[in-house]
Image: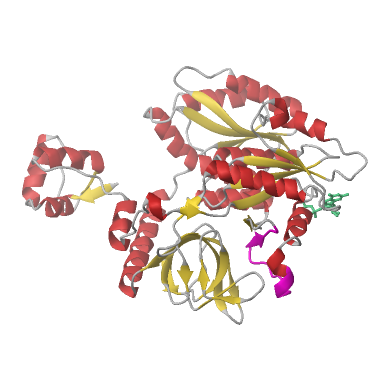
């Protein structure tokens, strides 16, 4: 963060020449239009007898929006928001369909469901659960990257006849990195080869200790095909929700998150918004990302028009000027003027950030932090061609941990680097160690776009060397 000498003077109501004089005393030669960093500015401010407060972006937005904090007394319990993850073919879609068919409201309405990325299921018990139907855990982490914490609970689907597979492990690591509790649904229990004990043993190897083994991870045996165990899964979700004490104030202007958005030929830009606080009403003026608009209409996943949406309800919103990104916030504001002001502020911020980030990778930032002693961990992801090499690298890296710095291995896997690896790296500032493997084209493209560092190796010694250098803050960023 920087400020010009002129601007700093203006804010303190001091003449720029006095600011320049103070800077000279500090050994900094600056002209009136030159920028100085925040730390130097702080010294000048103190020298001139002013008090100093760093204003964050949140402060500025808060100032414009006047977003109020909820009183404890206005909060009421809200429904949980669940994301289902797991290995391909383990039954995620089937399980969602099975749960959906138990929706009591759906029967009455009879409408055709359409994919809007999320929906709320009304269960016989009276409970409501919101499911996010976004494809894969890469989307889950991408959303988190934008600062959106949407999912309360992850349901990890593991096929009882197949056990834990590569994408199961990816899902576990993504969920862990975000701190979201996991419930394991052991699916396909109807199959002859089903063995839930084996699944539980395997979970243990990934530090998920299930309740049967004295841990706190709930497991539920289900069959999406035979529709068994679904009540138990519902109970497990509601129990976990209760532990999380999920609450929201529905009596305020809405705040939510964009789950997905698209350009619809007939209707223009539409976005699925999950309302998280307050109630969204047709006619509300909103800001999302750096766009703003007015809610023209809202529909649910059955295509029915609705006029109001409260906490944990996903709705399709019409009336956008552009297509926002998944994970963008969605805030209702008082009037057009505020909406425009905040949209313009964010647009400018985006430009500033883009300019600042040019040519600077996440690894480089991490190394800078390590160097300054701000970071104590070097996060890495290891992908290798064979299990043996992967283990050997992980073991060697762990041996390098000292009291001050440690290597944090977020994820290991055998096979090509995929998009899931890149999103995990991006959200954590990790770099990816590729041992005798390549990145698939999508991952390569994404890593370039998002500035994620992938380093290719074929000799373990070189990996060890580079990480050692990184830990001492000396690794040169890859050109
Ligand atoms: P996804 O890739 O995780 O979404 O998995 P799907 O839901 O598409 O299921 C993959 C395959 O497993 C399909 O052929 C399903 O019919 C089958 N399947 C899903 N759940 C069950 C189950 O509980 N029992 C049996 N026998 N098959 C299942």
Tell which of 439 and 291 is nearer to you.
291
* Residue 416 appears left or right of 276: right
Q: Which residue sits at x=52%, y=57%? A: 327
* Residue 338 appears left or right of 364: left
Q: Classify 246 as above or below 400.
A: below
Tell which of 422 and 264 is nearer to you.
264
* Residue 292 appears left or right of 89: left
Magenta-tinted stretch: 107-124
Q: Which residue sits at x=64%, y=66%? A: 116
- Name the residue at the right extreme: 192
**Residue 411, quarter of picture:** top right
Q: How is the image coloured?
A: secondary structure
Q: Percent position (x, y) of residue 182?
A: 64, 40
* Residue 26 appears left or right of 90: left
Q: Percent position (x, y) of residue 265?
A: 61, 80
| Magenta stretch holds residue 120 | yes
Tell which of 32 and 200 is nearer to you.
200
Q: Percent position (x, y) of residue 57?
A: 33, 52
Q: Percent position (x, y) of residue 445?
A: 61, 52
């Amino acid at each position: 963060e920087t400020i010009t000498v002129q601007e700093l003077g203006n804010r303190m109501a001091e003449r720029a020449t006095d600011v320049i004089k103070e800077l000279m005393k500090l050994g900094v030669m600056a002209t009136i239009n030159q920028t100085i960093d925040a730390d130097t500015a702080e010294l000048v401010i103190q020298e001139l007898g002013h008090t100093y407060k760093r204003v964050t972006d949140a402060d500025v937005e808060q100032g414009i929006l006047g977003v109020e904090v909820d009183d404890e007394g206005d909060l009421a319990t809200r429904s949980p928001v669940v994301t289902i993850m797991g290995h391909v073919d383990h039954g995620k879609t089937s399980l969602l369909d099975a749960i959906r068919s138990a929706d009591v409201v759906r029967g009455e309405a009879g409408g055709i469901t359409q994919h809007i990325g999320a929906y709320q299921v009304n269960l016989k018990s009276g409970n409501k659960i919101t499911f996010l139907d976004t494809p894969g855990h890469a989307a889950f982490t991408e959303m988190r990257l934008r600062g959106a914490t949407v999912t309360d609970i992850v349901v990890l689907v593991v096929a009882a006849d197949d056990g834990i597979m590569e994408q199961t492990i990816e899902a576990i690591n993504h969920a862990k990195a975000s701190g979201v509790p996991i419930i394991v649904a052991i699916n396909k229990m109807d199959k002859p080869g089903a063995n839930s004990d084996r699944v539980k043993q395997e979970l243990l190897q990934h530090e998920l200790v299930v309740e049967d083994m004295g841990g706190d991870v709930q497991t539920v045996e289900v069959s999406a095909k035979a529709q068994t165990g679904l009540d138990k899964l519902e109970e497990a979700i509601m129990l976990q929700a209760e532990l999380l004490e999920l609450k929201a104030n529905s009596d305020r202007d809405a705040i939510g998150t964009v789950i997905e958005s698209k350009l619809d030929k007939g209707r223009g830009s539409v976005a699925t918004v999950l309302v998280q606080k307050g109630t969204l009403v047709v006619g509300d003026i909103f800001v999302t990302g750096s766009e703003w608009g007015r809610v023209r209409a809202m529909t649910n996943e059955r295509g029915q028009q609705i006029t109001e949406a409260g906490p944990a309800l996903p709705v399709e919103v019409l009336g956008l000027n552009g297509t926002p990104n998944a994970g963008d916030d969605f805030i209702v504001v008082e009037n057009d003027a505020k909406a425009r002001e905040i949209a313009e502020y964010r647009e400018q911020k985006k430009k500033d950030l883009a300019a600042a980030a040019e040519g600077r990778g996440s690894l480089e930032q991490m190394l800078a932090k390590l160097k300054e002693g701000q970071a104590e961990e070097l996060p890495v992801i290891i992908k290798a061609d064979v299990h043996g090499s992967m283990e050997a690298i992980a073991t060697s890296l762990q041996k390098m941990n000292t009291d001050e710095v440690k290597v944090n291995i977020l994820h290991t896997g055998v096979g090509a680097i995929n998009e899931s690896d890149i999103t995990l790296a991006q959200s954590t500032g990790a770099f990816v160690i590729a041992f005798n493997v390549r990145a698939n084209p999508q991952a390569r493209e994404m890593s370039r776009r998002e500035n994620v560092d992938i380093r290719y190796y074929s000799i373990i010694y070189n990996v060890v060397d580079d990480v050692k250098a990184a830990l001492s803050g000396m690794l040169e960023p890859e050109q």
